[in-house]
Amino acid sequence: MADLIYETCKAYLVRQGYFLMLLWVFITTVILVYYKALVGFPWGKVAIIVVFSLLGMGGSYAVAWFGIRVNTFANSRTAYASLRGKLYQVHRIPLRAGMSIGMVLISLELLMMLVILTFLPLDIAGQCFIGFAIGESLGASALRIAGGIFTKIADIGSDLMKIVFKIDEDDPRNPGVIADCTGDNAGDSVGPSADGFETYGVTGVALVTFILLAVPNSNPTLQALLLIWIFVVRAAMILAAAAAYALNSAWVKAKWGEAERMNFETPLSTLVWLTSAVCIAAVFAITWFVLGGISSDVIHTSSLWIKLAGIVTCGTVAGAVIPELVKVFTSTKSRHVRETVKSSREGGSSLNILSGLVAGNFSAYWLGITVVALMGGAYLLSLGIDGTDMKAPAVFAFGLVAFGFLGMGPVTIAVDSYGPVTDNAQSVYELSRIESVPNVDEDVRADLGVDPQWAQAKFMLEDNDGAGNTFKATAKPVLIGTAVVGATTMIFSIIIRPHRGADRRAGEPVGAARSVPAGFGNWGSGDLLVLRGFDSGGDHGR
């Protein structure tokens, strides 16, 4: 059954690949018109942007395919492991699959950005980043939106068959079940994986761009140190997430290795909080190491490293607090969930919808208040950054909040991917009708060394599915919030570009390339946005 689901997923991804290539043709046309006809880039630079847009889109697509392949393997393995009647493997397999997706996603993104900075000619690095960001945004938007729509249509279609023909949700006679299982992967594995890849990359490009434009060219040392700090912290956070996962796995095995009952949400919650704590410690240590010993000749802001580490911490704390807030409204033990069930029993569909809307509005309110509060804290910390070190430090702080969100990237993706694996594991178990296979008890006993625990297996898969659905909802606000906050930094980077022309030398043409520190390439006219004919002098230019 898992192979059948994967073959359907593969057909979906192949179709999506054709659609992405068609979409890329249109985007390439826009790139050619803008950068060649309007900006006036030479053909070589335009070709670089086009090639890297394809690489960025290919990265999103490759990560999505990897995620769906790993998850479809984990589906059947989780279902089969449940026959032991023990909880640990039923929890470990989905989380391990999600962690592998998260580590590959973040590591591939970081590797591609480092390749651009390290191995490509310095005078084209800016164009490479632009094309890469365009491509991964293109891939993520299509995969996220299409996957979300696909899974809802398939889910509703399967439910309608269940209601009309009075058959179980995962009954093999229900022709919508395989599409529903494929949709779970398409909407909750492909979409978040591609979205996470894009968000991580675009936020990095926004921060790099902002550093190069907001930090004065007269202080190349600070520019270089901040760029080094960004990438070292990113690498350290990946290692911190891996260490937290290993520690949490050891604790879960020691406590529940032979248990038959546990709350599946508990180890996922401890993993999120442990990762947050380890990442915060790593951020402060790395920031002190890179920026702690800089002389006052380079930095005019006292204790800059503490301020920057504190701002990143605001985002990391948000990545841990948001799942807790989501659990209040979506957990299987949530009062809001019980109220919705009660509304369904006593008031029918209309009261059910109203109850769900109330819970959804409350959750959106508290999530929004939390993000605004932490961004407000980051803004207050940014007020201590001297304006001679950086223009608009508050904008940089918002970008670092998004950066802190993504510090827990592997774990965020892991708990998000946990949902589709547990959901499909239950479906695979029911669809396989394994209990009716001749001599299955003897075969399982010979393979696992224990008698199959059929009733316990069903209970564990159902309970684990509830935890998966809860944490599947936790990653969405994190990824969406990061994308919005990171985009804010990118937009203000574009705004700063014409502002820097306000102090151009007399007689210098509008949009002329300005000198930048050696080693960072020629971030001249058109590398981000050029407003041809824009009078950059005087108040109008400002």
Image (cartoon, rainbow, N blue to C red):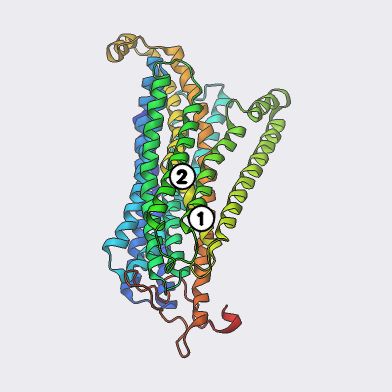
Q: Nearer the viewer, residue 14 or 397?
A: 397
Dot 1 amino acid type? Lys
Dot 2 amino acid type? Ile
Residue 30's place in the image compared with 85, above or below, is below
Q: Dot 1: what SS?
A: helix
In the current view of this chain or complex, which residue is farthest to the bottom? Answer: 507
Q: Quadrant of residue 275?
A: top left
Q: Quadrant of residue 515?
A: bottom left
Q: Which residue corresponds to mark 2?
A: 280
For residue 480, side relative to residue 202 (left or right):
right
Residue 448's place in the image compared with 332, above or below, is above
Label 1: few (<14), some (14–19) or many (≥20) C-alpha neighbours in 10 Å: many
Q: Which mark is residue 469?
A: none
Label 2: few (<14), some (14–19) or many (≥20) C-alpha neighbours in 10 Å: many
x and y percent of residue 362 in the render? 67, 40
Q: Quadrant of the N terminus?
A: top left
Callout 1–callout 2 Cβ contact below 8 Å: no
Q: Nearer the viewer, residue 293 or 101?
A: 293
Q: Quadrant of the C terminus?
A: bottom right
Q: Dot 2: what SS?
A: helix
Q: Earlier in the sequence, mark 1 or mark 2?
A: 2
x and y percent of residue 101 in the render? 37, 40
Q: Nearer the viewer, residue 23 or 422?
A: 422
Residue at the (47%, 38%) spot, across then down: 416
Residue at the (35%, 25%) spot, across then down: 77
Residue 157 visible from this viewpoint:
no
Q: Which mark is residue 307?
A: 1
